[in-house]
Amino acid sequence: MRRLYEIYEGAESRREAVPLGISWSALLLGPLWLLLQRLWLAVPAYSLPLITVFRVLYVYQAGIWAYVAALAAHNLLMALRARSLMARRCERNGLSYVATIPGTDRANALAKLAQVGGTPLAEWRPRQIVSVPDFVPSSWRGFIGVVLLTLKAAFRFRLVLVLVSLLVSAVFLLPAVLKHDGTANGFTQILLSYTLTTITALLGCATLWLACGTLARDIDDFSLLSVVVKPIPRWQIWLAKWTGIMVLNAGLIALAGTIVYGLMMARANQLSPEEQSKLHNEVLVSRVSFRSPTPDISEDVERVFKERINQPGVRELGEAFVRKQIREQLQSSLMATPPQFERPLPWVFNLGPDARKRFAGRPLYLRVRFYIPSTEYAGMNATWNHFWGIGGEGQRLVTLRNSFGSDTPTEFAIPSEQIRDDGKLYVRYGNGSTYTVLIPPENGIEILAPTGGFAGNYIRGLVIIYCWIGLLAAIGLFSASFLQFNVAAFVSLALLLVGLSGGTLKSVVEQGGIVGLDHDTGAVKEFNLVNRLAVAIYGTAHTVLEQIVGFSPVAALSAGHAITWGELARCVGLVLGVGAGGLGLIGMLVLTKREIAMPHK
């Protein structure tokens, strides 16, 4: 098989050939390959991290496959760095680069150079910053070359080494510093929620910095000028840089995600048998959520509106404001259950026509989160008594009683045998406490039913995080397309803050504009042209941003909620397609029209 060899030459015509590309012997032999190649300095540099990882896996009682995965990742990194290690050894031994020569093996490459008297031929390739594999089609060689340059820049800036160190430290040290309380919820909060949130924050910040720097700095120091003069369109340069960043992030997310998953599986055995059962039934599982539909109260709103509108001083408040207040009052009455009262209407959950068969013998969980009115204060020592009736008409009612506090999601098992033949499940509630209980229908009560395993759900969650990182990379490259590095970083952060300020956009839409706001009613006094434009612009932005930022994989994984393939496809389409794609199109257009060689201060 033919491959390329870098030829190094020293005193007394001493020559050595270094093969380009991945080293299969290093991949198979691992640290032993370093000894065979006499790379004495690299032996401790590569062996000590592997020994450290093995030691950590031993402490956490990891399985054999965790050791195999760690060794494979270590050997792969060494195989990819083999050419660089051997080239540095040649340079330390006083050898200098001569040429890059194709050959069947090292001896063949050295013989070719000897046949021409040691003077390289013109057709032999000079030393390149990156080497694109020969099997890549000619139309894609420029694109792949920029991708490799982006990856090389990340390694050159020591970004990869720093990120790997921070990610591994966060994954291992965070659970060691923050001790859980021995419960399944505390275990999940530390090992899953905190670590994944930290990983996302670290990768997000690093991605923004790298995306701004890799393009803006190339433009500022005119490095990009040597690329744009080649036969590669500028939009491909922009897309290749985004691709290079995402290739790097894919490896980092896979590394960190694998470690988190392995630690969870290994440390789950430290919990008590009862908590282990709760962990595997409520967290390490994929469960679909069913909510009771919110009743339509439009007719009731209109009926009450007609009764109140003619009362003194009501019409001056505005019809829209009055209707809004009436709707909120009626919704509050549906949510509230007074002390020692039973909720007049049961919640009806439609689990599907074949739900009775699908969930037969499998645990169902009712997840409840209630609040108390702002006018009441229960105190820290308040006691709560909740009574539940599972079943509808014609069924034997299964009654449950429990006690849990407000503002905290609580789950408890309910019998799946109470599902009716039509797939509906009725849940009744009685408030045995001394305070009013508010249970919102949209996020206060839901039924969780198992649909699959945790591993697939976990991978889909990591893919959603990956999509978010892709959007951040697009934001950074978009800003760097027309701004210098410092300004591009500032603008990227500003765009990120705007994307997270959905509450401000929503308030503008609810109050009807931005000009002439009445602070007593919370609405504008006059719906003029400016307010109409503001509502249209802010409403559109809020709708789009709400769809884009509406994915929270960490919360879903921590609660055992299923991340369906449909949700994943919608995330990819909105976050990458609409968000990153829209910014990418604008960034490519700006970079295409920008004068790269323009001198600047």
Image (spheres, rainbow, N blue to C red):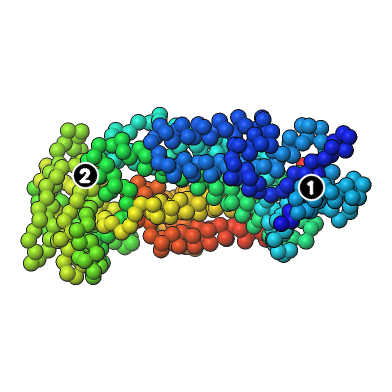
Corner quadrant of residue 348: bottom left
Amino acid carrying label 2: it is Ile
Q: Position of residue 115 (x, y in %)?
A: 89, 50
Q: Residue at x 71, y 54 (%)?
A: 132
N-terminal label among 2 and 1 = 1
Amino acid carrying label 1: it is Ala
Q: Is residue 53 left or right of residue 151?
A: left
Give the residue number, with chain letter if any, for mark 1. 107
Q: Position of residue 282 (x, y in %)?
A: 28, 48
In the image, which is nearer the foreground, mark 2 or mark 1?
1
> Between 70 and 268, which is closer to the camera in this rendering?
70
Q: Residue at x 53, y 35 (%)?
A: 50
Task: Give the Cα separation between the discs numbered 2 and 1.
Answer: 82 Å
- In this orientation, does residue 141 appear? yes
> Between 140 and 587, which is closer to the camera in this rendering?
140
Q: Position of residue 319 (x, y in %)?
A: 31, 63
- In this orientation, does residue 481 appear? no
Q: Position of residue 574 (x, y in %)?
A: 49, 61
Q: Residue at x 12, y 63 (%)?
A: 392
Q: Disc 1 on helix, strand or loop? A: helix
Q: Is residue 188 left or right of residue 74?
A: left
Q: Is residue 141 left or right of residue 473?
A: right
Which quadrant holds the C terminus? top right
Q: Do the numbered discs 2 and 1 sit on residues whose CB atoms are within 8 Å?
A: no
The dot on residue 372 is 2
Categorize mark 1 by other alpha carbons within 10 Å: few (<14), some (14-19), many (20+): few
Q: Disc 2 on helix, strand or loop? A: loop
